[in-house]
Image (spheres, rainbow, N blue to C red):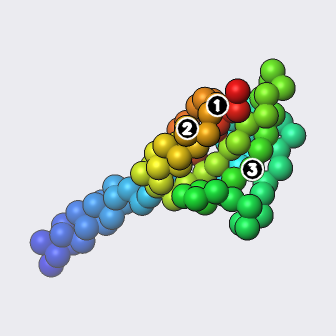
Amino acid sequence: MRRIAIVLAFAALAAGCSSAPAAPPTISDVATAQHLHACKVWPASQRTLFTRSEGECRDQAGHLLDVATFNSDTARDNWVSVVSETGGQMAFKGDLYAAWVEE
C-alpha cells in the first residue's frame, strides 16, 4: 500500500511539473507589455497569413505598428519573413507575438 502511495505522489508531482503550452497573448496583452496605445484589432477577414490575431497600435513616438500574435513561434517567424519583403523593420518580437513598423 505504501508503494502505491509513493507512486501516486510521484505521478501527481510529475503532472504538476509538466508545462502546458502558453496561450498566445492578445493584442491588448502585447500593447500593455510594450507600452503601446490607440490599438485597433482587425477582424479575421483582414488578418495576414500565419497570424492568430492582428491589429495596429501606436508606440510612444507615434509610429504605427502592425502587431500580431501567433499560435507558434514558427508561425511568427514565417510571418516575419513575409512582411520583411514589404519593407519596414521589426519593431519587436517575443514569445508568440511580433510587431512590424513601416518605414
Q: Can residue 62 be seen from the camera position used here?
A: yes
Alpha carbon of mark 2 to alpha carbon of mark 1: how far?
Answer: 7 Å
The tag earlier along the polypeptide, 2 or 3, is 3
Query: From the viewer's perspective, is residue 103 above or below residue 21?
Result: above
| 3D distance between C-alphas at marks 2 and 3 | 17 Å
SS category of the residue bearing label 3: strand
Asked if labels 1 and 2 touch by Cβ distance under 8 angstroms, the answer is yes
Left or right: 11, with 40 as reference point: left
Residue drawn 34% across the image and 55% down it:
17
Q: Which mark is residue 55?
A: 3
Nearer the N terminus, badge 1 or badge 3? 3
Q: Nearer the viewer, residue 14 or 36?
A: 36
Q: Which mark is residue 84?
A: 2
The amino acid type, in three-letter code, at marker 2 is Ser
Residue projecting furthest to the bottom: 1
- Looking at the rendered structure, the secondary structure element under dot 1 is loop
The answer to whether residue 23 is visible is no
**Quarter holding the C terminus?**
top right
Q: Position of residue 85 (x, y in %)?
A: 55, 39
Residue depicted at x 12% and y 72%: 3
Amino acid type at circle 1 is Gly
- Residue 21 in the figure: left or right of residue 29: left
